[in-house]
Image (tube, helix red, strand yellow):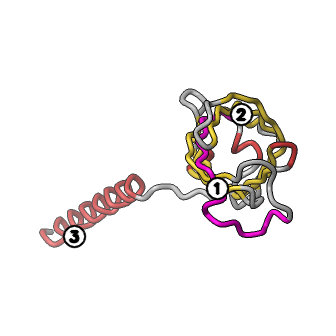
Amino acid sequence: MRIVKLAAMFLILAGAFAVLASKSHLTVVPVAKASEGCSLKTMQGTYGGVLTALSLPGAPPIPAATPQAITAFQPFQVLELINFDGAGKFQTTITASQGGTPAQTFPDSGPYTVNSNCTGSLAAGGGLFTFDFIIFHQGKEIRFIETDGTGVVAGTWSRMQGEE
């Protein structure tokens, strides 16, 4: 009789440990979900950015890919608010100073594309200026670089507070 009681107690304890182990396993291991990548909607909303760059004064060289001496560039500072509509168009307000001139504010707009791997590109200034970018943190941050050869510009746009 004693062996039957010990066996029953062992089975009850083993069952309790199995239940506890399975419950703790469910709370410890996070649920994995597939990444859906990025789309135009990933970059929907208003972003802000501040950047310091080097830019060529005047019209860009033809062809734009011609390497320029560092002495040909001037410092260029930008404060920017940019709004992406989630459908492939952006509008921006830029306050910029080049080579120490007083800052001037002007609007711009253009198209942007987003690839499923969270890279993309945009064209500004009527297509004169092009940028490639990478989207981070589900669209909270975008890092970009100028690709047209008219300047040495790289920066970050961050989604504005309240736009999440």
Start and end of the magenta stretch?
A: 63-82
> Which callout, 3 or 2, points to the residue nearer the camera?
2
| Disc 1: which residue | 73
The residue lying at 27 percent from left, 65 percent from top is: 14
| Disc 3: which residue | 7
Tag 1: residue type? Answer: Phe
For numbered disc 3, what is the local secondary structure?
helix
- CA gap between label 1 and label 2 equals 29 Å
Tag 2: residue type? Answer: Asn
Position of 143 with respect to 36 (left or right) is left
Of residues 104 and 26, the one drawn nearer to the viewer in this rendering = 104
| Disc 2: which residue | 83
Tag 3: residue type? Answer: Ala
- The answer to whether the residue labelled 1 contacts the one labelled 2, judged by CB atoms less than 8 Å apart, is no
Q: Toward which corner of the image does residue 125 lie, by quadrant?
A: top right
Q: Residue 18: image x %, image y %?
A: 33, 63
